[in-house]
Image: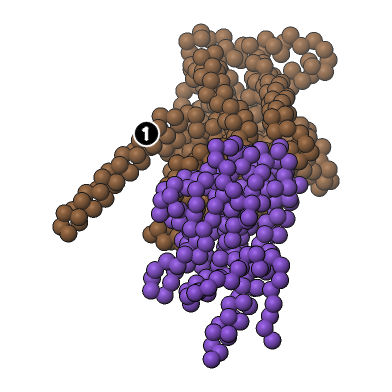
Chain colours: A brown, B purple
Amino acid sequence: MTTSASSKRAGVVIKSVVTFAAVLLAAYFVWGLRHFIVPAFVGGLLAYICRPVVARLERRRIPRGLAVGLLLLTFGVVTLVGLNSVRAAIPSEVAALELRVRALYALNHRYQALMGLDASWNRGNALYRLTHRDLDSLMDRVSDLLALTPDERALFVASRERQTEPAAATRSSRLLDYDRANVHVLEMRARLSGRGAPATTTAGASTSSSAPRPPTNSDPGALGDILSTWVIAPLIFLFLLWDSGTLKRGLLRAVPNRLFEPALAVLDDVDEAFGKYVRGIFLECCSLGLTVLVFLTLVGVPLRWAIAIGIFTAASNVIPYMGFFAALLSGLAYALLAEEIHPVIPLVTAESFAIWVVAAVALAELLKNVVYEPFVLGGAVELHPLVVVTAVVGGATLFGAAGMFLAIPTVTVVRVLVASSARHLKAYGLV
Amino acid sequence: MKPTFPGLKELLLPRRPNRGSADIAAIGARALFQAPESAIAKQHESLVDFLRHVGLFEDLARRDLARVARIVHEREYSDGEYICEHGRPGAALFVVRRGVVEVVKPGTGGQDIPVALLEPPASFEESAALGTGVIRWFSIRARGPVSLLALGKSDLDTLMLSFPTLANKVLTRLAGIMAARLQMLIDAEIQRESEAVDGGKP
């Protein structure tokens, strides 16, 4: 009796040690392969979304292989078109300088108007007196980011002087005025804050005086690393779409007979919950992106930029609460830079444009919360906001952006896995 | 008036001498699990060839049988191992591919009462594949090494999504089998009651 009890205890200890070691090993592998997690997840996510499409094509007597090939081709074409559009939208070096000059000018102009600042930037309204200690330092940081270095200014001025056509010359003259106004404001702010004159004022100075820009991530090695990491995404996509049950059967083959039925039931539950989540979040993101696109177009954002902001919002919405901030920041950034607006709503003016952008984004967020989430996402993600925030922050701390992206799907799957396992193991008398 | 049971019932529920009370109670269960006459175990044949003999899939073309073969789960059980247990929910339909399984029912003394023996290509637990969540009133255990095929509700759902015509045929057969078994159960229950009444007469 004593021998039997002690051998039983030894068995439990061995099982616990083996389980602990397996968990540690799994964690080690996850950590080691963390760079592949996001590409693999994106590939899996797309495969999950596309499964009903493949099923539909199969129903129309198109063989599975051909259906998957067609989908892959479609994704390839969409990706190429997207990359080309992005490449076309990336400004040239001179255009980027123009953009910074315009942004800094617009920022200073709007800050001065909002705070009621006089020409010397010395005295402002009550709002300025209340907030200038905090906002001035923030403005300084943003100004430092946008201000041109002496070399950049030289390049910018030279590029403007080359413009001879009347329309281009007028525009160049306006931009040079903006630049001079920017330099003037920067000098004033530097004097007021007791800082030294910014590097941008000393045009023509030696290059050593300009602050070195941080290295960009555009060298071929980094690009190669990214491509080699992301090549796994189409592979996972292909494998999961091609698979017509082999993966599931393989998983279940490893399960002991007495756990077969509970495992089948748990897998079904997880599959259902994850499918609901993926399809729900996909529809919700698309709906939010489309709503932002429509609303921003109505208030006067050009269609091209509204589409870009809509896509950015939809992609960001995968991370909880991020869709709203992405739409707000990108919309406000556009409102800051916009020189001409063509609103569909007659009430919108250049002065009130930013407020209308905020209202449009807020309305889109309201629609998401009141209509899309309950009706599109349904009960697919019934998580407490505290759990959502903890998961996102924890994921971001451990795995960076990938962790933020994966936090909610992981929590959803783990929650269903634990709840379903407990329910079925109990129903089958195994616990 | 004593009821009469012509036709199929006569074949499936033959009268047996010296029947005990437990055996009478198991008549209904036996009716449910009666293996078809054509239940001949064919060893060493391919899965697709085997599936052709299973009543559930007998209307299917070879291409459709291959599709079914790709989604079924193959399980191996050793002698005495329980495949499913009394009082537990069902999650999959099973088809006997090789070997023999025994349907048992818990008796009053805690002992299992044998109800029926199933041979290839008999199937059981059809309702589980429909996701009805019915709790089993019987257990099934292997008699010697057994090879089974299992089909869960999600597997049928997959078929329905991609090949609705195929899934429709399977579901129609499934409904037919369940209806026939229900009819047999009702007949067997009536017979059991009439025998109990007959047994009570002096």
Dot 1 falls on a residue whose secondary structure is helix
**Quadrant of res B162:** top right
Q: Residue at x 77, y 43 (%)?
A: A294
Q: Residue furthest left?
A: A2
Rate crowding at label 1 as few (under 14), some (14 to 19) or many (20 or more) other CA atoms within 10 Å.
few
Q: Which residue is mark 1?
A: A28
* In the rendered image, the vertical position of residue B13 relative to residue B79, given as above or below: below
**Relative vertical location of residue A428 with respect to residue B168 in this rendering, above or below:** below
Evaluate whether residue B76 shows in this view: yes
Query: Would residue A318 appear left or right of A178 to someone viewing this image?
Result: left
Q: Residue at x 82, y 18 (%)?
A: A167
Q: Nearer the viewer, residue A186 or A59?
A: A59
Query: Which quarter of the rendering shows the C terminus of chain A?
Result: bottom left
Q: Position of residue B8 (x, y in %)?
A: 69, 65
Q: Position of residue B134 (x, y in %)?
A: 56, 65
- Provide the chain ID for the residue under circle 1: A
- When the figure is inspected, residue A165 is found, relative to residue A388, above or below; the finding is above
Quarter assignment of residue B92 = bottom right
Q: Measured from the top left, where is residue A116 in percent x and y?
A: 63, 42
Quarter the N terminus of chain A occupies? bottom left
- Is residue A414 rendered to the left or right of residue B3? left
Residue A208, relative to residue A40: is it above or below?
A: above
Query: Number of labelled discs?
Result: 1
Q: Residue at x 75, y 37 (%)?
A: A57
Q: Visible in this render: residue A111?
A: no
Q: Residue at x 61, y 68 (%)?
A: B13
Amino acid carrying mark 1 in the image = Tyr
Q: Nearer the viewer, residue B8 or A333?
A: B8
Q: In the depicted view, which residue is nearer to us: B19 or B64?
A: B19
